[in-house]
């Protein structure tokens, strides 16, 4: 029996079912990122005691807390109060024209927010200046951060262009960098509360991922009774891809294309990258906060799709 024309028209003109929705809301010194009305993360850029813009907190599948609370909150059970510069999720480097932007202290550098280019849809775009302790500009960056809901998984894409905006700028050869995250302590590979495992794209496991070159690294383990993980992807267009990884067994995971001296024992300076005055260098990364282990989350397949 033929369906009535009106019913057919109604069926073909229904709007598609909406995917998970990302919304951005400006607050004091921050942008709040919600997915389907629930907090995913906050972009903190001013007035929060940080020497650089960071993302904190980050809530993954099932609302799992994906990064540690310290140094934003103290006393969370199982957390170590070490490395106060490991502030959730960030991009910076430990030797820029000889100045550390990685650490926090009297003579360290500061990445200072200048303006928003865009806060719309699922994307925050900003301009920042990298300043010495005396306020002297070393370089600048344009950074775009996009947030995605992929079923129960969540992803954050970074697209960072560093400009030699005042003179030549040298990103020096040190392990202390660069695109980093400090995980929930449950994802540690070693320690009193450690329940995590780690692997890279080359099949190297555990703490041995440190200093190795790989397209991606994945850490996973049980949080609140559910297995979840954090994978970081290095884009094929990045400098010196596949990158080296400053990925520790205590929860620090950082992509670092500069630290060749530390990672491979080569002469100091081998990993230096000089950007000539007026020129620029682009970096792209994805953080995938996923349910399940590396196999269940199909990290290798996800990387291949994203890298295209």
Image: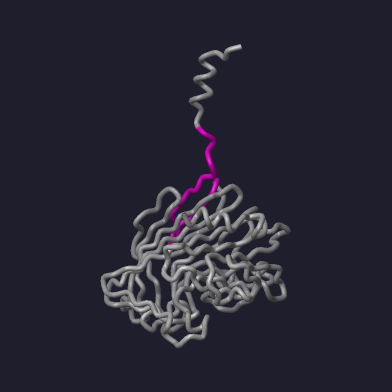
Give the residue displayed 40% in from the left and 53% down from the top.
119
Q: Nearer the viewer, residue 139 or 304?
A: 304
- Name the spot of residue 291 as percent of width and height, x first: 64, 55
Count the numbered circles shown: 0
- Name the spot of residue 10 as percent of width and height, x first: 51, 21
Q: Nearer the viewer, residue 45 or 195?
A: 195
Does 259 sit above or below residue 125? below
- Name the spot of residue 186 as percent of width and height, x first: 68, 67
Whether the magenta-drawn stretch holds residue 5 is answered as no
Does 26 sit above or below residue 170? above
Outermost residue toward the bottom in this view: 267
Give the residue displayed 52% in from the left and 82% down from the top.
264
Does 61 sit above or below residue 254? above
Give the residue displayed 51% in from the left and 85% down from the top.
265
Q: State which region is magenta.
A: 16-36
State which quadrant residue 194 falls in.
bottom right
- Name the spot of residue 210 as percent of width and height, x first: 58, 76
State which quadrant residue 30 falls in.
bottom left
Q: Nearer the viewer, residue 274 or 163?
A: 274
Does 210 sit above or below residue 56? below
Indicate the colouring scheme: one colour
Outermost residue toward the top in this view: 1
Whether the magenta-drawn stretch holds residue 19 is answered as yes
Give the residue displayed 46% in from the left and 77% down from the top.
102
Q: Answer left or right for 97 relative to 176.
A: left
Q: Quadrant of the N terminus?
A: top right
């Amino acid at each position: 029996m033929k369906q009535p024309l009106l019913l057919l028209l109604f069926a073909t003109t229904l709007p598609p079912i909406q995917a998970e929705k990302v919304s951005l809301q400006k607050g004091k010194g921050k942008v709040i990122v919600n997915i389907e009305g629930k907090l995913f993360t906050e972009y903190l850029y001013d007035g929060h005691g940080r020497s650089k813009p960071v993302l904190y907190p980050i809530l993954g599948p099932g609302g799992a807390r994906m990064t540690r609370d310290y140094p934003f909150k103290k006393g969370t059970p199982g957390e170590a109060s070490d490395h106060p510069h490991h502030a959730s999720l960030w991009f910076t480097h430990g030797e820029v024209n000889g100045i550390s932007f990685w650490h926090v202290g009297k003579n360290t550098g500061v990445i200072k927010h200048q303006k928003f280019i865009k806060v719309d849809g699922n994307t925050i775009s900003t301009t920042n200046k990298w300043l010495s302790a005396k306020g002297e500009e070393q370089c600048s960056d344009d950074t775009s951060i996009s947030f995605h809901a992929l079923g129960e998984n969540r992803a954050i894409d970074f697209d960072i262009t560093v400009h030699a905006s005042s003179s030549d700028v040298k990103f020096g050869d040190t392990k202390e960098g660069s695109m980093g995250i400090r995980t929930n302590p449950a994802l540690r590979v070693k320690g009193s509360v450690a329940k995590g495992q780690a692997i890279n794209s080359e099949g190297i496991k555990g703490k041995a991922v440190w200093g190795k070159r790989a397209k991606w690294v994945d850490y996973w383990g049980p949080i609140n009774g559910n297995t979840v993980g954090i994978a970081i992807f290095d884009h094929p267009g990045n400098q010196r891809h596949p990158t080296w990884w400053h990925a520790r067994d205590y929860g620090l995971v950082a992509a670092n294309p500069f630290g060749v001296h530390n990672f491979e024992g080569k002469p100091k300076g081998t990993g230096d990258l000089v950007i000539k005055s007026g020129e620029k260098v682009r970096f792209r990364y994805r953080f995938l906060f996923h349910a399940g282990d590396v196999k269940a989350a199909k990290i290798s397949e996800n990387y291949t799709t994203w890298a295209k």
